Amino acid sequence: MDPATANQMMYDALFSALVQHFPTTFGVSNGALDPRLQYQFPDPANLQPANWVDPLEDVDFEAAQCLLGDRPPLLKGARYAPDSAQSIFTSYGDWIDSVEASNPATNPEYREALRVLMDAGARMQQIAEIATPSFRAWQQENPGALANLTAWLTASPPLIAAQPYATQYAIASQEYNHAAAKTTQIVEVLNRPLGRAQAAADDPAFQKKYAIQGTSLSTIGQTQVGDVFSDPVENWTNWQQGGSLNQNPFQSTITSGTVPQYTVQPVTIEVTETYSYFFGLFSSTTTEQQTFFQQVVDYQNFQIELSFASVNPYTISRQGWYSLDVLQGYAPTKYIYNGVDFFNPTSGPLYLVPRTVFLGWNPVVKLTIDDALFQAWKPTLDADGGTGGIYVNGVLVGVGIPYTQSASPIQGAVELTFGDQGNPESRSTVPTVLGFVHDVIDGYAPSRAQVAEAEERHERVATTSGAEEVAGV
């Protein structure tokens, strides 16, 4: 198996294990993943520990927690898009400021109410034209009594001379007024979500100033990782202090050639990058990391047993200022604003919005490799007392804790264990971000045909609106 294939297989295997362990988080239904969700591993070359969960050591943990939930979307290649560097809060604010009120002319209910309105108005006009000669004759017989035709047709009690027309006019007038009220209500209902979302996005009550790197203040929409039932700060602090040593244990066994039940959308890792492969030696050079990985996975009995004392998915909520419904409802017809293509699947800052983050702490890795290969790498592994550790998906494992060696039931193989969940020192290691579940904003469709159709629709709307004004509607 070539290294690239083995590398992709390991990412897929870990993703598959996460889905099977947390099916609800991924929206699994009838064996299929929810297409509105997408999972992404973090950039292994730029992985940051979730040290914001330690309120004792990090005075800005609340700000960092907010920033974690406010991160821009990841690309399929596990890299942040250049145009997505600004936060979700900033991108969402820029987008929502550019969104126009919904066009009622494209709403079927509005179009039907408008048709009734126009028909009733036409009947009122027709009845008035037919009744005009009778009204003029009545005026001559009753000079100064009523000045206009409408008053004559709607007089109470009805005038005997107007009775042939007044009933029909009253019915048409009632239909007209009802349809007019309904069109007004429909427009109000259509625009209400956007109006509320725009007001909330600008409301200082939903914003907070955070100290960024201790030198400057940044205004960010209130964002919370976790909830009252699953709080990462409380969970990790409780675990660190021994309250629950195995709060939510997780284990995944990865072997060469396995076909996972679920496969993640391709996660491409450039081989020239540090942490380029799924696992490697942490304290070695990039060349050594690449060589170690390639030689290890070439062994047909190679196996990784990855376990965490706890892996938890924590929801990300953007309190008050953010509306996913508005975002999804208005996205299909809003493509580019001020040069930003918000819903571009490659670089759009709002195409993927993190909704859940996976945090894991105290990992242990048992690595089964060829004994001869182990002997060749033993000097490197034994450097610094064997405490150099390895990385798996960018997560550091066993740094500062000597690895252990044991016999394997497989002939010619050896088992190497990195990390120790029973070691008190390991409990000081803060959780690590293992990945995100994103909402897919699937309204993006900027093909030439769709853009042309949208432009034509806007032209029709403008024409329709002009006709309504002429008709006095």
Image: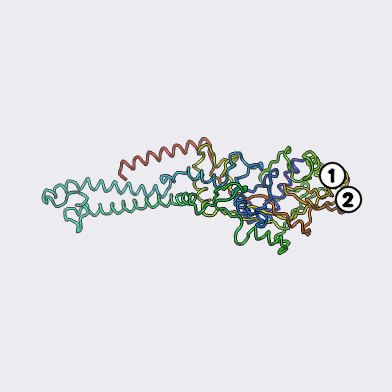
Q: Position of residue 462 (x, y in %)?
A: 39, 39
**Which image quarter is the N terminus in?**
top right
Residue lying furthest bottom: 243
The image quarter containing residue 86 is top right
* Left or right of residue 384, residue 105 in this image: left
* Cα distance between the residues tagged 1 and 2: 23 Å
**For mark 1, what is the residue?**
380
Earlier along the polypeptide chain: callout 1 or callout 2? 1
Residue lying furthest front: 215
Of 427 and 213, which appears nearest the observer? 213
* Left or right of residue 214, residue 470 in this image: left
Count neighbours of disc 1 (C-alpha within 10 A) and say few if under 14, some if 14 to 19, many if 20 or more. some
Q: Amino acid at mark 1?
A: Thr
State which mark lies toward you, 1 or 2: 1
Q: Amino acid at mark 2?
A: Gln
**For mark 2, what is the residue?**
411
Residue at 33% x, 54% y: name it: 178
Of 77 and 263, which appears nearest the observer? 77
Count neighbours of disc 2 (C-alpha within 10 A) and say few if under 14, some if 14 to 19, many if 20 or more. few
Secondary element at tag 1: helix
Of 394 and 8, which appears nearest the observer? 394
- Can the viewer see residue 35 in this picture? no
Residue at 16% x, 56% y: name it: 160
Determine which of the numbered discs, if any, sits on residue 321 in the image.
none
